[in-house]
Image (spheres, helix red, strand yellow):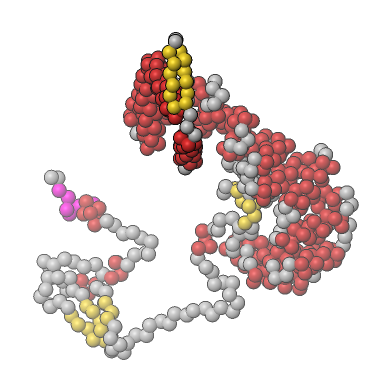
Amino acid sequence: MIRILLFLVVVFALGLGFAWLADRPGEMVVTFSGYQYQVSLMVAAVAVVAVVAAVMIAWWLLKALWNSPYTISRYFRVRRRDRGYQALSTGMIAAGAGDGALARKKTKEAAKLIRSDQEPLIQLLEAQASLLEGDHEGAREKFETMLDDPEMRLLGLRGLYLEAERLGDRNAARHYAGRAAAMAPQLAWAAESTLEDLTGRGDWDGALKLVEAQKSTRQIERDAANRRRAVLLTAKAQALIDSDPNAAKTAALEANRLRPDFAPAAGIAAKLLFRQNDVRKGAKILETAWKAEPHPEIAALYTHARPGDAVLDRLNRAKKLQEMKKNHAESSLAVARAALDAQDFSTARKEAEAAIRMDRREGAYLLLADIEEAETGDQGKVRQLLSKAVRAPRDPAWVADGVVSGRWAPVSPITGKLDAFEWRAPMERLGQLIDSDEDAPDAAVPTIAAPTKPEKENVIELNPAGSAERPTAVAVSETGEDDVAPVTATASAAVPPDGDAAEPAEEMARLPDDPGVDPDDEEQKSPRKFRLF
């Protein structure tokens, strides 16, 4: 649009110029070689413009003829390149679709039309075609060749990483991922694999730097980065708790600042503060974590904050936790444990039963069994509670990839994934699929009434006296129900000689778990039906 406007402006300016010359008549006299030429000013202007136009056209023609060999070769070169890129595009589509034969064909065609140093994608297509054909050794050679090209280096590292993962060589895979992460921290696959390598080796500082780089490149969100940093700082505090308590405390407090509701960070921070006699600050950290989500480790640390406290003091501290989080099973269990230590059996029993009503679980029944044994010593009730504990759902624990642990760990022992452990109930026992009614108080035991024998029965003979079929009888009672009478020894004796003999009812009875004898096997074992051919 702008070009059209400029063209119109130029044409309008030329028109105004010629109009201005036409309104101002004049003559131009040119003397050349003894001759004098006299023309009007308008004609002279038109002649000058025509000469300039003719010179420009002649120059264009001369330039076109001079550059014609280059133009022709350039035309064929562009056409050849377009054909090569078309073959490359078709090959990439075929590789994505899994057509190895077409991908290899288009790879050779593209390599003839385009040089590989001009288009690096040809190397990628060759590697993909080799993978589709099952030539993993050739594909690895292509990926190793890419490492020499700065533009293709990351692609080569990615291919070698995937090949190492396929072969199960975790060390080689992490090596390639580490090289890629050093060059480009924004690569998710490289950063995650490098992070697993660093956490597996216990290099918490290196893992923290990598997470910070991920956060700066916006590879992960801020909340996810804070969660990872809290986990790594907690793991660092665990590693330094004995060798460097001050550094461990600094890391634990930083982790608790990032995630105040993270129970492992709050627990280790409070434990280090208690060791330095800073009970008030440690208790405040535990209270904040308890309000977010009650946890038995937090309750144990809070009630035993001062080693020299009496059992009644620990009971009062447990009740204080209960006031912070009412109507929660963990609060009742914490009070019940403290009351059991204080020999306050009534309070312990009441809180344990309240915990069972809120969340029926294995630990609550075990605690109630301990209370029963300590108070009454009734072994019958203790065994009854233990049997209920076996059938009850399991207590929450730290679970990661099917592994149940009593203590939190920063990485999974199976996959090495960071922050894999979750506080939840493990998979239920198979017996829990069937609900038990034993826990219901004063449950009525269902009784089955024995059927009464009718006073009079009408017996209908289904077979006539002379029939060769096995005699059976159906008893029709007065209530309208049909009872099938068993075949007795007397009825078996009344069978004609040519009929099939029936066994008495007493001999037909077998145990419920007796599968009986297969009729085919019985015929083979019978000596009366033995045949040679």
Q: Quadrant of residue 65?
A: top left
Residue 528 is inside the magenta segment: yes
The residue shown at (17%, 70%) is 470
516 on left or right of 359: left
> Does residue 519 appear in the picture of this structure?
yes
Q: Nearer the viewer, residue 348 or 471?
A: 348
Q: Nearer the viewer, residue 221 or 468?
A: 221
In the image, farthest residue toward the top: 33
- Vertical side of 244 occupied by 301: above or below: below
- Vertical side of 340 occupied by 3: above or below: above
The residue shown at (31%, 59%) is 516
Q: Position of residue 133 (x, y in %)?
A: 37, 28
237 on left or right of 35: right
Q: Give the residues drawn in magenta, as a range.
A: 525-531
Q: Position of residue 297 (x, y in %)?
A: 74, 56
The residue shown at (11%, 73%) is 467
In which quadrant of the rendered image does the C terminus lie? top left
Q: How many marks?
A: 0
The residue shown at (14%, 70%) is 469
